[in-house]
Amino acid sequence: MMVTTGTLVDADTTSDYYSFTGTKGERITAAVTAQGLVMGSPQGDDSSIIDAVITIYDASKKQIAQDDDPWPRTGRDPQVFTVLPADGTYYLVVNDCNTAFPFGGCSPANLVFTFDYTLFVADVDQLTSPEANQGAEPNDTANAMSPQIGYVLPPMALPGQYGLYTVDGDFASAADVDVFSFTPPVDTAVSAGQRAHAEFWFQPVGTNNGDGSTSNAKAWIVDSADVTKHLSEIDQSNYSDGDNPNNGPADLTFPVVLNHQYYLFVQHQSLVSKPTSDFYFARHFVGSFSYGQLEASPDNNNSLATAEKLFTPGMVTPGNFFVDGNISSPGMNGDIDYYTMDVPAGLTQALLFCDAQRQGSGLRNAKFELLNVMGNPLGPSNILSELPNMEVYLGGISPVTLPANTTKILLRVSAGSQDPNVTGTFYRCSIFLQ
Ligand SMILES: [Ca+2]
Ligand SMILES: [Ca+2]
Ligand SMILES: [Ca+2]
Ligand SMILES: [Ca+2]
């Protein structure tokens, strides 16, 4: 384990170089804290502080892994995971986004005034945040021997705040499947008005802004009572990396029952098998990682007139809304969910981010629309049905402009069909008024 402090000379030219030695197959993580050193840094996205990037090279200076922002994205401070391919020397470079990616996508270098950081490098099995490794093959079926995610409260944690875990393994062949068991603790903290979710954030693959793996993973969650039924499923080949606003990395999620056993299946998902470099890392959390007001009743919100009201959670900026619902029966004459939101005075634009299939749900062609009180689309009706390889959102450079004096808007959610092999019907949306 190595902890060191540094200060970048600038944010657009100069890199800091480190070296370390490692062994073949060693699972390591490296993290830089820069935003996190500054008290009050707004959610880790302060443009006056370096936007650090970590890049790891082998002894021949070939890039093997890289991370700009962490997944889950908690800000701009990077954390990279990888498996070392050989015994020997490795080089680790810390620099700013502008130095690592000179062709754009970074906050301007001339706005950066704080260059201090700490660098932490460790074996994944030495982290305070516990590792669930696949263990010895064969481990391809769900049974009492399946490696378990060992929930334990981190030091100083609040009751039920079980923290983050790392789930990892490698693919011995093109047919390899690894199975993990998890039972969310009965006292897992769940925010008021929400339901518990298990989240598995699969780290992007590839050597550019990825963990260096040469295989995508297909991953699904099953109930221990029926391991053949896929509750939630993602195929990583549909996802990209954390710097792609239109197709980010995969978060496999499912609303779980506490104190109930589930299994996570992770399967090799590439044409070619490269056992020495086909591996996976997923970060895991159970509880309330994100906001999501639980839909009160699937069938009381089926019309404009009976839209369910969304509330801004306590301590959150007024005008931010979050919902966690289900389309109980997708299709032409199926379930439709309407929600209503009060627009705080002075706010004139709306952003919308939603996921269903993108987070593993079996809903297909889920449709998310912002409407006025008459039920007509707000602005251009340009929300396409959800596709497996594209984020559904209204925002970025084109937020929805609210007509003058708008005091109320609505969200309408529907879905085209149910995947025949995935039973989950959940979706989640965030609405930000600005
Ligand atoms: Ca970064
Ligand atoms: Ca394996
Ligand atoms: Ca296996
Ligand atoms: Ca409904």
Image (cartoon, rainbow, N blue to C red):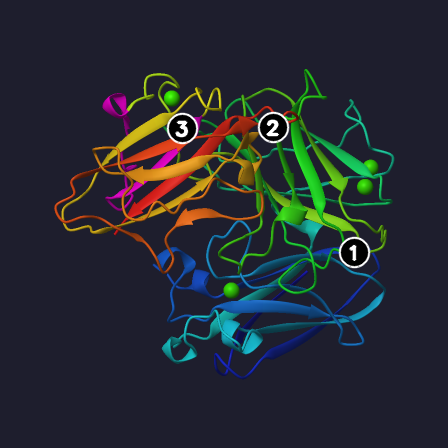
Q: Earlier in the sequence, mark 2 or mark 3?
A: 3
Q: Which residues are magenta?
A: 304-326
Q: Is residue 224 above or below residue 369?
A: above
Judge by depth and name the residue closer to the eye, 349 or 193: 349
**Tags 1 and 3 touching, CB below 8 Å:** no
Task: State yes or no: residue 36 in magenta.
Answer: no
Residue at screen point 64% across, 25% down: 420
Frontmost residue, 361 versus 42: 361
Q: Is residue 310 visible?
A: no
Q: Looking at the picture, which amino acid does disc 3 mark? A: Gln
Q: Which residue is mark 1?
A: 26
Whole-number angstrom distance, CA of label 2 to CA of label 3: 25 Å
Q: Quick one: label 1, few (<14), some, or many (20+) residues within 10 Å?
A: some
Query: Residue 291: horizontal and vertical position, in percent?
Result: 39, 37
Image position, residue 165 (x, y; %): 61, 42
Amino acid type assigned to the residue bearing label 1 in the image: Glu
Q: Does any atom of ligand 2 lie closer than 8 Å to the CB of label 1?
A: no
Q: Earlier in the sequence, mark 1 or mark 3?
A: 1
Q: Check residue 194 in the rendering and tell me which mark sits there, or answer none.
A: 3
The disc placed on residue 419 is 2
Judge from the rendering whether residue 401 lies leftward or rightward of residue 14; answer left or right. Answer: left
Evaluate if marks 2 and 3 touch, with contact meaning CB atoms under 8 Å apart.
Answer: no
Secondary structure under the numbered disc 1 in the rendered image:
loop
Q: Please name the amino acid that badge 2 sits on.
A: Asp
Label 3's element?
Answer: loop
